[in-house]
C-alpha cells in the first residue's frame, strides 16, 4: 500500500485511540533500515510510523554536506515508492526537532508539503515533531501555535513535547529527576494554547518519567497513571472525554505492564529507536567476529568477498531489526490490527 494519506493517517490514529493500541514509530537512518522497519510491520500485519530525527536526516544527507532537508526529502521520496510493495499503511514523521534546528529542518519541510498540497498532492510527511522541552512552557507553546497553524495548511499532524524527557536524544539532554512528570496545569495550558483539534490535530508527548537511551526495567520510575490524570482533568474542563492523543518516548526497558497502562490511558504512538539500533547492529557484529578472516585481509591474504559484501551482512541486519519491530507491534497491540 502507498504511504498513508492525511485522511488515512487520521483514521489510523482514531482506530488506535478507540482500540487502545499504539503504532510503533521506528527511527530509520538509511534505505536499509527503512526496509527493515517496513518488513517488520508487514510481517506483524501492523500499520506503523517511520520517522527521521534531525541526526538521522543529517546522516541521510551525506557526510559531504550533511543537509538535513535533503536527507529527509530523499528518504521520504524513496519511501513513497517502496512502501507500495508492503501490505500495511505507513505514515512518515520527523522526530525531535529543537528550536535551533527548526529553520533548517521542520519549517522547510512544512513549506515543501504546503506546495504539494496547493498542487492537489498529498504532503510529503504526515506529521512533524516540535521538541520544545528545553524551552519554558510559554515559549514552547507559542512556537507550537505557529507550527500547528502551518502544519494544518498542509494537512499535517504536529507532535509537541511540552515537558522534558530524561536522557539524551540527538544532542538534546535532560537530567533524570522529579521534573520528568507533566502536571495537570501543563496539560490545561497546552489545551488553552493549541485547542483540542479545532486548530489542527496534534500528538502530545507528555512526560511520566520517560528516559531516552538504554536502561533496564526498574531503573526508571514510570508513572503512566499521569496520562489518565491529564485526560480526566482536561476532559472535564473542556467537556471532551480523553482529549489527548499521547506519544510514549523513551520506552526502551519498559515493562509490558507499564506499556499496557500507557495504552489504556491514550498512548497511540510509541517511539522505538535504541532497541532497533541494537537489533540491526548485533547480527553485523556477529558476522564480523565469526568471519573476521574473511572480512579482513589477514596476513596479506585476499579475504573472502562473499564475507565482506555488504549484502551478506546487510541481509542479516535487516532480518534482526525486522524481528524487533515485530516484537514492538506485539507489545503495542498493533500486530494483526492493520487497517483493511
Image: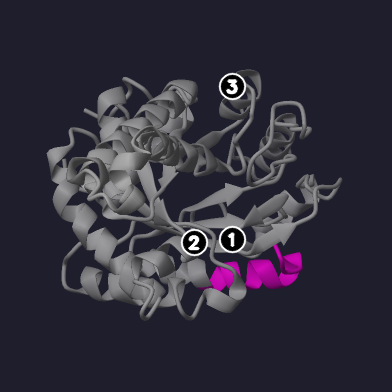
Kindly report the distance in space between the C-alpha atoms of the residues bearing marks 3 and 2: 30 Å
Whether label 3 touches label 2, CB < 8 Å:
no
Horizontal relation, residue 68 to residue 270: left or right: left
Label 3: which residue?
260
Would you call the spot at circle 3 few (<14 residues within 10 Å), some (14-19), or many (20 or more)? Answer: some
Q: Residue 199's mark?
A: 2
Bounds of the magenta span?
Answer: 133-146
Whether label 2 touches label 1, CB < 8 Å:
yes
Q: Image point 48% across, 26% down: which residue?
A: 332
The residue mark sitting in front, 1 or 3, is 3
What quarter of the picture does the C terminus occupy? top left
Quarter of image, res 265: top right
Q: Image point 71% across, 40% down: which residue?
A: 230
Q: Is residue 227 above or below residue 30?
A: above
Label 1: which residue?
194
Q: Image point 36% across, 79% down: which residue?
A: 64
Horizontal relation, residue 36 to residue 227: left or right: left
Residue 253 screen position, x and y as percent: 63, 31
The residue mark sitting in front, 3 or 2, is 3
Q: According to the image, what is the colour scheme of the structure?
A: one colour
- Quick one: label 3 or label 2, which is nearer the N terminus? 2
Quarter of image, res 173: bottom right
Residue 339 screen position, x and y as percent: 27, 30
Amino acid at each position: 500500500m502507498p504511504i498513508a494519506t492525511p485522511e488515512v493517517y487520521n483514521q489510523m490514529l482514531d482506530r488506535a485511540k478507540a482500540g487502545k493500541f499504539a503504532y510503533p514509530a521506528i527511527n530509520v537512518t538509511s534505505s536499509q533500515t527503512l526496509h527493515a522497519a517496513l518488513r517488520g510491520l508487514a510481517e506483524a500485519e501492523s500499520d506503523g510510523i517511520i520517522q527521521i530525527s534531525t541526526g538521522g536526516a543529517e546522516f541521510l544527507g551525506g557526510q559531504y554536506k550533511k543537509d538535513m532537508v535533503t536527507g529527509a526529502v530523499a528518504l521520504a521520496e524513496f519511501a513513497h515508492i517502496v512502501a507500495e510493495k508492503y501490505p500495511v499503511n505507513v505514515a512518515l514523521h520527523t522526530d525531535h526537532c529543537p528550536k535551533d534546528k527548526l529553520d533548517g529542518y521542520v519549517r522547510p519541510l512544512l513549506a515543501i508539503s504546503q506546495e504539494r498540497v496547493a498542487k492537489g498532492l498529498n504532503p510529503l510527511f504526515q506529521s512533524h515533531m516540535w521538541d520544545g522541552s528545553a524551552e519554558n512552557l510559554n515559549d514552547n507553546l507559542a512556537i507550537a501555535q505557529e507550527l500547528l497553524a502551518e502544519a494544518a495548511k498542509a494537512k499535517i499532524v504536529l507532535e509537541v513535547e511540552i515537558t522534558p524527557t530524561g536522557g539524551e536524544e540527538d544532542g538534546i539532554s535532560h537530567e533524570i529527576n522529579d521534573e520528568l512528570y507533566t502536571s495537570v496545569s501543563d496539560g490545561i495550558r497546552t489545551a488553552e494554547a493549541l485547542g483540542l483539534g479545532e486548530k489542527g490535530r496534534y500528538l502530545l508527548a507528555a512526560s511520566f518519567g520517560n528516559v531516552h537511551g538504554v536502561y533496564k526495567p526498574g531503573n526508571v520510575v514510570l508513572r503512566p497513571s499521569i496520562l489518565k490524570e491529564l485526560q480526566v482533568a482536561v476532559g472535564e474542563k473542556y467537556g471532551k472525554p480523553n482529549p489527548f492523543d499521547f506519544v510514549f518516548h523513551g520506552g526502551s526497558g519498559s515493562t509490558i505492564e507499564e506499556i499496557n497502562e500507557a495504552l489504556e490511558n491514550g498512548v497511540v504512538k510509541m517511539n522505538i529507536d535504541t532497541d532497533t539500533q541494537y537489533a540491526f547492529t548485533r547480527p553485523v557484529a556477529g558476522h564480523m567476529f565469526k568471519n573476521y578472516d574473511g572480512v579482513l585481509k589477514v596476513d596479506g591474504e585476499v579475504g573472502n568477498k562473499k564475507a565482506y559484501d555488504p549484502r551478506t551482512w546487510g541481509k542479516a541486519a535487516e532480518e534482526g531489526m525486522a524481528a524487533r519491530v515485530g516484537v514492538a507491534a506485539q507489545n503495542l497491540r498493533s500486530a494483526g490490527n492493520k487497517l483493511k
